[in-house]
Image (cartoon, helix red, strand yellow):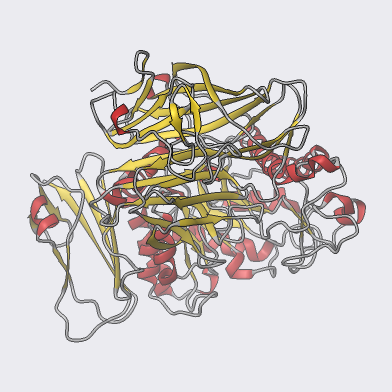
Amino acid sequence: MLLGIKFDESKRIFKLDAKDTSYLFHVTDSNHLLHMYYGKFVEDTDLYYLLRLGDEKFVPAVHDAMGPHSFDCAPLEYSTSGVADFREPCLQVMDKKGMSACEIEYTSHKIYDGKPKITGLPATFANKDSDCQTLELNCIDKHLNLEVVLIYTVFNELDVITRSVRLKNASDDVVHIRRVLSTCIDFDTADMDMITLQGTWARERHVQRGKLRYGKQSVDSIRGASSHSLNPFAALVSPDATEDAGEAYGFSLVYSGSFLALAEGTQYEKSRFVMGINPYDFDWKLEPNAEFEAPEVVMVYSDEGIGKMSRTFHDLYRNHLIRGKYKDVRRPILINNWEATYFDFDTDKLIDIARESAELGIEMLVMDDGWFGKRNDDTTGLGDWVVNENKIKGGLKNLVEEVNKLGLKFGIWFEPEMISPDSDLYRAHPDWCIHVDGRKRTTARSQLVLDMSRQDVRDHVYGQMKEILSSANIEYVKWDMNRQITEMGNEVLPADQQRELWHRYMLGVYDMLEKLTTDFPHILLETCAGGGGRFDAGMLYYSPQIWTSDDSDAIERLKIQHGTSLVYPVSTMGAHVSDSPNHIVGRKTPFKTRGHVAMVGTFGYELDVTKLSEDDKNDIREQIIEFNKYNKLVRTGDYYRIGDPFANSRFDSWMFVAKDKSEALVEYIQVLKVPSLFEHRIRLKGLDAKAKYKDEETGQIYGGDTLMNAGILIPKLHGDFQSHIIHLIKV
């Protein structure tokens, strides 16, 4: 089959074919766009027979070249507002008279190899033009003279289609964009389940699944960040969908600010899904000849369940979103001093940690919060990015050199987007934080949010960061963001542009991240937002790993990492072995189990190695050997979820399979020990059914089909929170 994008001129049908996926829509005689099909690959181009055109009683109808029809019944390719479609619109604009009706018509298109960038925004990319094909569909609202370009990209080797939107005001008058969502799919059924990721601080991305109801159900953020609470991801799946069977449609927004993902069950037993920038409190003044580009939505289709959907997202993001030096390589094993010392550290303490870490095989020391300004607790110093030499005796360069002499790389923590009211920067520039003049300034963790939409603010903060990063051999940056935005306003934008601030803020953050990764391409960047409060595809464009959650407890991480893996590769999850009892939940977990759970992610340590027993130190040495042995498989292999921590409290299990199926790693966590039960049998996934596999530990040989159909026994494990791994090698 010939993949890519085709246009049947005679029937005016666009057909987009990805690996095993087809997507079709039709241009009517009246130049409206009607969606026809999205799902498993089909050979036929002409699916016009699927359209049900006509008008329903008591529904406003249009009489034109299509005949009588209603926008409220029609499967629209991109929905607008105020023209007889009563479902959720993607596009709403207000003209100079205060009117908000909008109707777009097709004018032309172009199809080309490769994929365009989106100005100022993260997006997936082609490594070479032959990777994908792009359709730019030019439309216009003739009344407003507003040009709307719908952009589709098809990845040939993956079941991926991306969508974004670009607007241009071709009139002589200002228009205000009230909403511009990036994708719209009108499904021919409402018989689906919706899967989303919800949570809170230290409990991020828990899976919730429920039947799609009539009416609207949504997940969103109005916090100025994608948030701990809800993630910019949703999936619509068939009611019978499991990990390994059924249909799944996944949607992931490549954006880190306020978002909306909404599914609507409609009156005619159909459904609509839309996604993009949250319209709440949003307005963008579009001057004559000006353009606005909306962020990208990644759409993934799977006919083999939720698991295949996840693996497709993983392959796309690993190969076509993450950039830079660390895209395809093992990341350094690091130790972060936060849970070891909190604010109570100095040069001597850090060097003690580094010395002990070097002996254990750890490769990098990361100095966390508290090294700058007058920062000795949560209440002071943010914004004053100057080394506190009362703590860092002899200065930062001296500390880094001493750590390097021990054989360790050095990393450092920043929180560039924040400011403490008790700081020299705030005293000098109280107007630089986001605020509404005359109203109180609400703090969280004793801090306010700097206005990253302002060039002067970004220049000052980045200038300080650049000076620090240029002063010593720093090879890692942890970029934190520990609160969300309230009292959204500033003293620079005019009144009719204040509602642009939500998006301008995010564009400013992306601008700083782009500068950092450009000026310091050797630095490994790990973003963080109060733990996992901004774990999204937008951030992955700049940082190949993200701190997954402040809850570093291995057992709590089972649910967090399970949910995160629905869309994000495990190689992006910052995961550490922490102290026991854990500082967040007080749980005592064996060192071995903590290591196996952290090994799913980027791997590191969050504890005081100078206080460990010799047994624990030996465990670290063994963990590092184990991590090095399996990291390539974990980082590049296909990920299969076997257990489901949301469905049972007894165990969790997962596995990694090499792309060529030459080896596999199975991990099993016994959460709660149950008496009077035989060994647990689990069925493996993703192996070569015709091959034989050898258990490296026992030497026993199994058929791939046997392991997947009959399963394998997990030996009896004594006690709660125990772990076991199985390494299988193809023979």
**On the rendered structure, is 577 left or right of 542?**
left
Q: Give the residue drawn at x 18%, y 53%.
A: 728
Of residue 563 and residue 192, the one placed in the foreground of this image is 192
Q: Residue at x 39, y 61 (%)?
A: 209
Q: Judge whether 188 appears above or below 442 on screen.
A: above
Of all residues, the one furthest to the top in this rendering is 10
Q: Is residue 553 visible?
A: yes
Residue 692, horizontal then vertical, whole percent: 9, 48
Name which quarter of the figure residue 25 lies in: top left
Residue 322 vs residue 121: left or right?
left
Q: Residue at x 69, y 45 (%)?
A: 282
Position in image of residue 70 (x %, y %): 47, 36
Q: How many marks?
A: 0
Question: Compared to 263, does 338 lie above or below?
Answer: below
Q: Is residue 543 visible?
A: no
| Placement of the N terminus among the 4 image quadrants | top left
Position of 688 with respect to 172 (left or right) is left
426 on left or right of 681: right
Q: Residue furthest front?
A: 57
Q: Position of residue 422 (x, y in %)?
A: 85, 63
Q: Position of residue 567 (x, y in %)?
A: 41, 49
Instruction: Name the one closer to the observer, 626 or 38.
Output: 38
Q: Nearer the viewer, residue 647 or 187?
A: 187
Up the image or down, 604 lies above or below 468; here it is: below
Name above or below for residue 373 compared with residue 138: below
